[in-house]
Image (tube, rainbow, N blue to C red):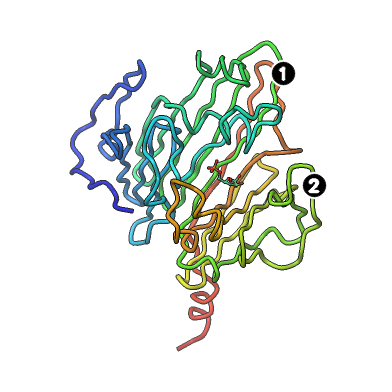
Amino acid sequence: MPRLPLLPPTQTQPVTTGDLMVALPASVRLEAGRGGLPVLLVDGSAARAEIYLHGATVTDWTPRDREPVLWVSSASRFTRDAAIRGGVPICFPWFGAQAGHPESPSHGFARLSEWSLVGAEDDGEDVTVRLCLTDSDATGASSWPHCFEAVYTVVVGSRLSLALTVTNRGDDAVVFEEALHTYLEVRDIRATEVTGLEGNAFYDSLAGPGVGPASGDSDPVRFRAETDRIYVGTRGTVTVRDTDAGRSVLVGKDGSETTVVWNPWIDKARDLPDFGDDEWKGMVCAEVSNIRDAAVRLAPGGSHTMTAIFELAPSARTMTQRSTPS
Ligand code: TA6
C-alpha cells in the first residue's frame, strides 16, 4: 500500500486534537491522511510509523533499513464509519460479536472512535505518542455504557511498543475484552509459521461460539486453510516466522492471557468487502489480547495495562548462515 510522503521536519509545532493543545516534536507531524482522516506521521531516528486518530490505528511501523512490518489492505476503507482493515485496530470493550447484542459493532467501538492526541515526545532513540479515549454520549448509548478512560501509549523505535491502559472511572465494577488486532505482512502465508503457542489450548472460532477449547498441539501453527483461533493461558512471546522473506517478528507481551491467530484464506477474504481477493496470501494476524475467560474485571478506580512489543529478529535461515562459517 502506498505510504504518505513524509515532509521535511520543521520546528516543534503545537497542534489541537479534540480540545487539547499538544506540542509535537519535529519528528512527529499531524497531517490529513487517507480519506482525509487525521494521521500522525512519525519519522524517528530508529523507525517511522503512521498512527491514525481514527481508532488510534497504527498503520505503519518500519524500522530503519528494514521492510514495513504491518499489513494494510489495498481495499481498506478510510472513513469514520468503518474500521481500518490492517495495521493494529484496537478491539475494545468486546471482541468479535458482543454476547447478547447482535446489533453491536464487531470488536467494539474503540476502533471506530476518534482518539485524542494527549502527548508526544522524542528521546532521540524512541518517539512516544499517547492517545486517549474516554466515555462519551456515543459510548454511553452503546451496549457498554460505562465511564472509562483508555490511554494508548505507542513507542516507535527499533521495537514497537503498544500499551493500552484502561481505567474504570465509574462507581460499578466493569468487565471488558481487549485485543491489539495486529495485521503482519508476510511474503507467503503458506510458508509462514507461528511458534510459541505449542501446547496451549485454543478455541477454534470456526467451530462456533458454544464449542469448548481444543487441547493444544506440539507443532507450530501452520496455515493450510482459514485459521481463526483463540489461544488461552498464553503469557509468553510468539514468533511469526516468514521463511520466504527470511524474516521473523517477535511478538512479546505483558498483561495479556490470550493470543488470537487469524488468516481468512480464500473464501473469507473474498467475502470481506474491504479485503482484496488475493491478499490472504500476504498477511497474518497475531493478536495480543484478553478475551473469553481472560476478560478483564476492574473495580471502580481500577486500571489495567496490556502491552504488545514487536521486534524484528533474524530468521532461523539467517541465523544458520551466521553460524556456518563461510
Ligand atoms: O481476530 C480474528 C477475527 O475475530 C476473525 O473472526 C475475523 O472476523 C476477524 O477478526 C476480522 O473481523 P472484522 O470485524 O475486522 O471483519
The residue at which mark 1 appears reads as 173
Q: How far across and how far down the image is residue 37, in percent?
A: 32, 33
Q: Quadrant of residue 302?
A: top right
Q: Quadrant of residue 114?
A: top left
Q: Up-down: is 78 above or below 316?
A: above
How many discs mark residues in the rendered view?
Answer: 2
Q: Up-down: is 143 above or below 181?
A: above
Q: Is mark 2 within 8 Å of ligand 1?
A: no
Which amino acid, mark 2?
Answer: Val
Q: Residue at x 55, y 73 (%)?
A: 316
Q: How far across and how far down the image is residue 191, in percent?
A: 54, 71
95 and 46: which is toward the camera: 95
Secondary element type, mark 2:
loop
Within 10 angstroms of label 1, few (less than 14), some, or many (20 or more) residues?
Answer: some
Q: Residue at x 61, y 29 (%)?
A: 93
**Horizontally, is 207 left or right of 80 in the view?**
right
From this viewpoint, which residue is outermost toward the bottom?
326
The residue at which mark 2 appears reads as 211
Q: How far across and how far down the image is residue 86, in percent?
A: 45, 47
**Horizontally, is 209 left or right of 135 in the view?**
right
User: Which of the image's four quarters has the C terminus?
Assistant: bottom left
Which amino acid, mark 1?
Answer: Ala
Q: How far across and how far down the image is residue 87, in percent?
A: 45, 46
Q: Residue at x 49, y 87 (%)?
A: 325
**Horizontally, is 7 left or right of 132 in the view?**
left
**Horizontally, is 77 left or right of 175 in the view?**
left
Within 10 angstroms of label 2, few (less than 14), some, or many (20 or more) residues?
Answer: few
Answer with mark 1 or mark 2, whichever residue precedes in sequence.
1
Q: Up-down: is 135 above or below 42?
A: above
Q: Quadrant of ligand 1?
A: top right
